[in-house]
Amino acid sequence: MREEIVIRAEGLTKKFGSFVATDHITFEVRRGEIFGFLGANGAGKTTAMRMLCGLSQPSEGRAQVAGYDVATEYEQVKRHIGYMSQKFSLYDDLTVEENLRLFGGIYGMERGRVEEKIGELLGELGFETGRKTMVGSLPMGWKQKLSFSLAIFHEPGIVFLDEPTGGVDPVTRRQFWELIYRAADRGITVFVTTHYMDEAEYCDRVSIMVDGRIDALGTPAELKAQFGGPTMYEVFYALARTAKRGD
Amino acid sequence: MPIVRVENLRKRYGRGRVEALRGVTFDVEEGEIFGLIGPDGAGKTTLFRILTTLLLADSGDAEVDGMDVRKDYKAIRRHIGYMPGRFSLYQDLTVEENLSFFASVFETTIEENYHLVEDIYGQIEPFKGRRAGKLSGGMKQKLALSCALIHSPRVLFLDEPTTGVDPVSRREFWEMLRRLKERFGLSIIVSTPYMDEAVRCDRIGLIEEGRLLTIDTPSGIVGSYGQTLWAVRSDKMHKLLTDLRGIGGVRTAFAFGESHHATIDPKALDMAALRDRLKGLGHVGISIEEAEPTIEDCFMSLQKGIKK
């Protein structure tokens, strides 16, 4: 079976005046892959991710996400992806199920399907008792897990996670990765940024951006062999240290 | 005498519904880097706001440099530097204007205390005419630290200075703190959600849900882990985690970077038996080695109610 490419970037570039934030990056991500998108602050990750999510127009180059061109078919791109950031939050003064219904509605899901999905999701999280709880009163860890479930609630082919585990306690951080694995097992492609280098090890493949370029791309094992580091931390350090661009 | 004393501090929010601090007690010695390590919502910021006299505790006592946070708040404010978690400088003032503003509020000048900030401010001085709002994240952080230092405080309070910062910049930041301590004998209290930063501190308190789980030196905490920790690997890491948790005698199993960390009841299971079980479940390339616990392992074992 042919491996299906769900993200394809070719020379994708974003300039702000004379500043090249993202500098001709080229890569592919396969269906069901967990792709770690690493880089130092200011390396151009956020800019690249905004283009891939259809939120920002490339200056040069092109990218297809879920089969749609990010420059011309960005509305389609937005419909077919999920997105979660550390800051992305649910509505505190709605209950868990109200939040899920709201987002289901925004994505134009059919009412019956929404109710069915709410049941499935709460069952999978082991959180049936929390259905009518106000989100504001939930512990941080639950909010984070719910945010992720919400990001994939409309069954997108790809989910973009921007530092999803920042500030999360160590046990919840690991439970969160369990959810990522489960989503990937169901064929959802996971595109994730993180500053935790142990999490880079959990990715199928990892790219590392330096000064707007992708300077390394491979499985964690390949990168460790290539850069001679015992862990991804050393690999990251060896690359990020070469950055010319100030942050 | 400790530079900071905290005695059974308690604080509730939201008409008493949220218990942010549930009786926190610790001391910080003069010239020490003390780390408060825990996840978001653990109570770190509440504690900082009480110690910097910006918030009153419901009960308990706290002293900074021998002064009471309730009665002597004005004097305390002259003697401490505070870097809040959120960037709080004037975005439309330049780098230099921000620093001289903070100096003037404390009736001093940049020149008078330049030696204190030279190492840090020197790095952003080439951009001193740039508006603070236009700085990169790393430069903002350096400016904020300079502004917290410019009046020559006795104690620095840094609330999550490295959150969202990449590993390379984090390491540089900790090196700056180390030099401040060594050169000027500053006492520094710093909070962080990153467990790997614990080793940069002289002593740490692990905090969760408004309670300190333990207070000790990083090596002291690691030394009292009290169990043998095993790093387990195979060619199918994700399946391995599920399988480990299903094997009798395995107490805990967590993903830990390139291996899984497991604790095992030695009476119920030895390593040869574990290896056989894993082989039987279809694993190849099995490796089981004793591992040195990290602060993160310790935090997880101290967290209440953790499930296998």
Image (spheres, coloured by chain):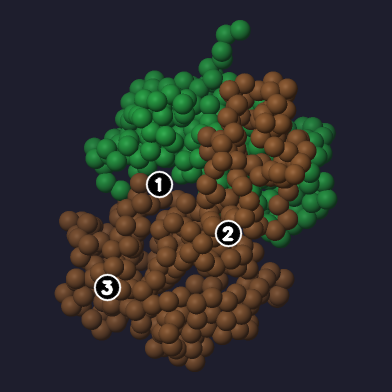
Whether residues under marks 3 and 2 lie with C-beta atoms below 8 angstroms apart, the answer is: no
Looking at the image, is mark 3 or mark 2 nearer the viewer? 2
Q: Residues within 10 Å of mark 2 (few under 14, many from 20)?
A: few
First in residue order: circle 1 vs circle 3: 1
First in residue order: circle 3 vs circle 2: 3
Q: Position of residue B180 (x, y in %)?
A: 29, 67
Inter-mark Cα distance, 1 to 3: 27 Å
Q: Is residue B270 left or right of residue B46?
A: right
Instruction: Tell me which residue sits at (33%, 73%) in the image.
Output: B186
Looking at the image, is mark 1 or mark 2 nearer the viewer? 2
Judging by colour alone, the chain drawn in green in this rendered image is A
Q: Colour of chain B?
A: brown
Instruction: Tell me which residue sits at (83%, 50%) in the image.
Output: A129
Q: Is residue B71 left or right of residue A229?
A: right
Quarter of the picture containing the N terminus of chain B is bottom left
Which residue position holds label 3?
Answer: B184
The residue positioned farthest toward the top in the image shown: A1
Which residue position holds label 1?
Answer: B166
Q: Chain of mark 2?
A: B
Q: Residues within 10 Å of mark 1 (few under 14, many from 20)?
A: many
Which residue position holds label 2?
Answer: B224
Question: Which amino acid type corresponds to the residue marked 1 in the rendered image?
Answer: Asp
Quarter of the picture containing the C terminus of chain B is top right
Whether residues under marks 1 and 3 lie with C-beta atoms below 8 angstroms apart, the answer is: no
Q: Position of residue A16 (x, y in %)?
A: 30, 39
Instruction: Tell me which residue sits at (54%, 20%) in the image.
Output: A30
Marker count (numbered) = 3
